[in-house]
Image (spheres, grey):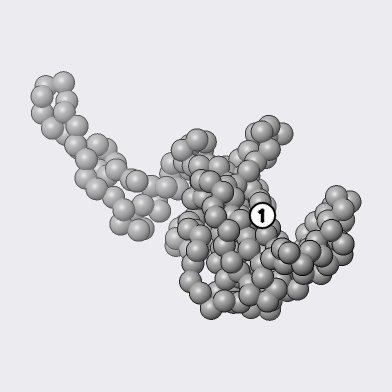
Amino acid sequence: MDLMDLSHQNRINTQLSKQKVGKTIYTDCIRAENIKQIVPAITQCIECYPRFHRAENPDICIMVTGIPNVGKSSLINALRRMHLRKGKASRVGGEPGITRSVLSKIQVSENPLIYLLDTPGVLSPRIENVETGMKLALCGTILDHLVGEDIIADYLLYTLNNYPQHRYVQHYELEGPCDNIETLLKEIAKKLRKTQKVTAITGTGKFSEYPDGFLFH
């Protein structure tokens, strides 16, 4: 929830209610008050179904699913940290594809005894349109190189200017908003000192510097 626009909460809740989702909890895996709601909610859901009242198998095993890079592993680690005072059991990272297979059961609670299964992220096999695909790429649910870093950056700049959100101008101390991604990246590269001199061999076999005098990356 720390990365979402909370003004859309009612619309999201309405849509989930139409899909028969019984309980929705917003969490950022950092604040304890959000994480504390999860185990009681799970327990309440389980107790509603008589078939789970089994004396021979009192433990609860739940699969955690979601789109790539949404925080499934972070959620498991947060639950484990809170209820068991133990460290990470699932690898996390800022890109999709960190979890590549269904892992073994990870205990996250002692009473009640709850195990979670971390799973690789899943997406719909068909993305509705280009704009949806670009939004997913911006959120880190698709590997950058599959779309193209330059294309993603260009779409991000378009989105920021379209809303408009020009905080990047102040952040990088630029003269003003820009609608050309190459120009913007050059300016940012110079501000961050991420440049290097480059040379090229001319037709005469001599070295000459590029007009810009630097290569940005």
Q: Quadrant of residue 131?
A: top right
User: Who is closer to the viewer here, 135 or 83?
Assistant: 83
Residue 49 image-quadrant placement: bottom right
Q: Residue at x 77, y 67 (%)?
A: 55
The tally of labels here is 1
Q: Position of residue 128 (x, y in %)?
A: 71, 34
Neighbour tally class for label 1: few under 14, some 14-19, many 20 plus, Cα within 10 Å: few
178 or 93, nearer to the observer:
93
* Spot occupied by residue 192 in the image (x, y as percentages of width and height): 35, 58
Q: Is residue 109 left or right of residue 86?
A: right
Instruction: Report the amino acid beneath label 1.
Output: Met
- The residue drawn where x is 16% and y is 21% is 203
Q: Residue furthest top?
A: 203
* Residue at the limit of the structure toward the front, as seen here: 56
Could you tell me which residue is drawn at 65 percent across and 55 percent down?
64
Question: What residue lies at 16% left-to-right and 34% top-to-bottom?
Answer: 208
**Residue position for label 1:** 63
Q: Is residue 163 above or below residue 155?
A: below
Residue 89 visible to an observer of this rendering: yes
Provide residue 9's location: percent of width, then percent of height. 79, 62
Is any atom of residue 4 visible in this view? Answer: no
Where, quadrant-wise, is the N terminus in this rendering? Answer: bottom right
Task: Please indicate whether residue 148 sits to the left or right of residue 190 in the image.
Answer: right
Q: Is residue 146 above or below residue 101?
A: above
Q: Secondary structure at mark 1?
A: strand
Question: Residue 193's spot in the image, x, y percent?
Answer: 30, 57
For residue 70, which quarter of the picture? bottom right
